[in-house]
Image (tube, rainbow, N blue to C red):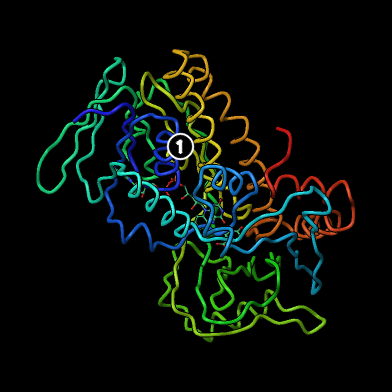
């Protein structure tokens, strides 16, 4: 089998790249280990920057998102029993859209299917060879048969657990990592929204986040031990923890409902310092991870793909390699900005075990500052909506 661009992974990065390349007249094949049902139902991110929604609309895959996504012009920070609003639109002129990642994936898969695009689900034994040559290839097993995909480029969009990153020789790569000693307990709830906007709460018991999915389904998270088990958490225990962390002194309270999904995610920051070797390019979580606090992961995957799609077009349309050669440097500028913001917001909002009471008071002082100083609020808002200059 032969194509121009072989893409490993049908997450947001892989599917969006395949779609954008198709619109530029470039052929691609996407290989994915999971089934279509599985990728279209896994609950992950929810917040899309305006950069992301603009690109999806421009690329013709934003219709359902425009109809069903909720545009938010601000969010609330809850601390010390009070709530203060960060007015994103007044500060930056931009907003964010709450539209679930798996809904974005459904829209992208539908677009690939409608265009007769090649997406192979349920593949196994993926391996890459020849990235030091102009004729790399990907071997994989599909429907019990071993196959080889010959291509001009291999794009590793296979997330944090994929095989692509390890195909770059260790001597050519530098990894930067910070593992947090806490995780997020996430729930999906059948209930009306607690508030019109997201609430990020800092409390001595730990962080909590009240988000939404639709007028009838809500998404909430709270800081937990990453090694804890969802079985240790009865519904009553979850609600009492969320009330303790989020309810404010003026009586505003989290709206309860039927909890129909519980999960725990660990948190880390990670950057692979090269995102390219020969004809292999990495994009999205395959190259970098952020803790979820700043809602940057999916948006970073989209920004990598924007850069890569443009560079591949320059290669095929104009025989230029300069944009491909600059890919790592161009992408890393935005990535390190988002890494810093996600790390900063994580440390601002979470209970940090082992730090002194002095440092805990500094967290509160900083929250007072970002919610009262225009300059500090603007810096937070620009980073959150994704418009900060690097
Ligand atoms: P992935 O979505 O991980 O896709 C990679 C794909 O590759 C997967 O489908 C996988 O099955 C496949 N694959 C893996 N190995 C192979 C292989 N060997 N061969 C073939 N296929 C393979 N981000 C935000 O921007 N906003 C948020 O609000 C937000 N909230 C989050 C909340 C949670 C709880 C979590 C866990 C994450 C959140 N994120 C958020 C992060 C976001 O979900 C990820 O950054 C995003 O999914 C990255 O997309 P990707 O395409 O790079 O990787
Ligand atoms: C959601 C996830 C995030 O990481 C975040 O910062 C805000 C919202 C969500 O899943 O809705």
Q: Quadrant of the N terminus?
A: top left
Image vertical order of residue 267 relative to residue 199, above or below: above
**Dot 1 crowding, Cα within 10 Å, few <14, some 14–19, many 20+:** many
Quadrant in which ligand 2 is drawn? bottom right
Q: Nearer the viewer, residue 314 or 256?
A: 314
Q: Quadrant of the C terminus?
A: top right
Q: Secondary structure at mark 1?
A: helix
Image vertical order of residue 369 relative to residue 257, above or below: above
Residue for point 53% across, 34% down: 306
Label 1 CB-ligand 1 distance < 8 A: no
Residue 283 in the image: state x and y as whole percent: 45, 36
Residue for point 71% across, 71% down: 196
In this rendering, would 82 be left or right of 265? right
Residue 335 in the image: state x and y as whole percent: 59, 36
The residue where tag 1 is placed is: 20
Mark count: 1
Residue 237 in the image: state x and y as whole percent: 54, 83
Q: Nearer the viewer, residue 20 or 84?
A: 20
Image vertical order of residue 65 relative to residue 241, above or below: above
């Amino acid at each position: 089998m032969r194509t121009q661009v072989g893409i490993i992974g049908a997450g947001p990065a892989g599917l969006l790249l395949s779609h954008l390349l198709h619109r530029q007249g470039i052929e691609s094949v996407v290989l994915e280990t999971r089934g279509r049902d599985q990728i279209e139902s896994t609950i992950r991110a929810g917040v899309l920057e305006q950069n992301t929604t603009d690109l999806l609309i421009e690329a013709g895959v934003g219709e359902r998102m425009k109809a069903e996504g909720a545009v938010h012009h601000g969010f609330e920070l809850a601390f010390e029993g009070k709530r203060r609003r960060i007015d994103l639109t007044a500060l930056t002129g931009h907003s964010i859209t709450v539209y679930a990642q798996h809904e974005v994936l459904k829209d992208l898969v539908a677009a690939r299917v409608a265009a007769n695009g090649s997406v192979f689900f349920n593949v196994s034994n993926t391996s890459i060879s020849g990235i030091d040559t102009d004729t790399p290839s990907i071997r994989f097993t599909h429907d019990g048969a071993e196959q080889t995909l010959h291509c001009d480029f291999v794009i590793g969009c296979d997330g944090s657990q994929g095989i692509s990153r390890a195909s770059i020789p260790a001597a050519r790569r530098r990894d930067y990592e910070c593992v947090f000693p806490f995780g997020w307990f996430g729930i999906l709830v059948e209930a009306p929204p607690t508030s019109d906007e997201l609430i990020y709460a800092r409390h001595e018991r730990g962080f909590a986040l009240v988000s939404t999915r639709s007028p009838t389904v809500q998404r909430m998270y709270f800081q937990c031990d990453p090694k804890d088990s969802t079985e240790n958490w009865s519904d009553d225990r979850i609600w009492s923890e969320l009330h303790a962390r989020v309810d404010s002194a003026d009586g505003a309270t989290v709206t309860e409902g039927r909890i129909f999904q519980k999960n725990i995610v660990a948190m880390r920051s990670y950057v692979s310092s090269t995102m390219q070797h020969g004809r292999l390019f990495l994009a999205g979580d395959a190259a970098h991870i952020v803790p979820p606090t700043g809602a940057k992961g999916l948006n970073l995957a989209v920004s990598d793909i924007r850069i890569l799609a443009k560079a591949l077009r320059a290669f095929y349309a104009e025989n230029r390699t300069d944009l491909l050669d600059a890919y790592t440097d161009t992408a890393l500028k935005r990535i390190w900005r988002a890494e810093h913001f996600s790390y900063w917001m994580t440390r601002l909002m979470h209970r940090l075990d082992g730090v002194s009471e002095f440092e805990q008071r500094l967290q509160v002082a900083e929250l007072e500052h970002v919610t009262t100083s225009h300059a500090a609020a603007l810096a937070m808002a620009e980073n959150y909506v994704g418009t900060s200059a690097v």
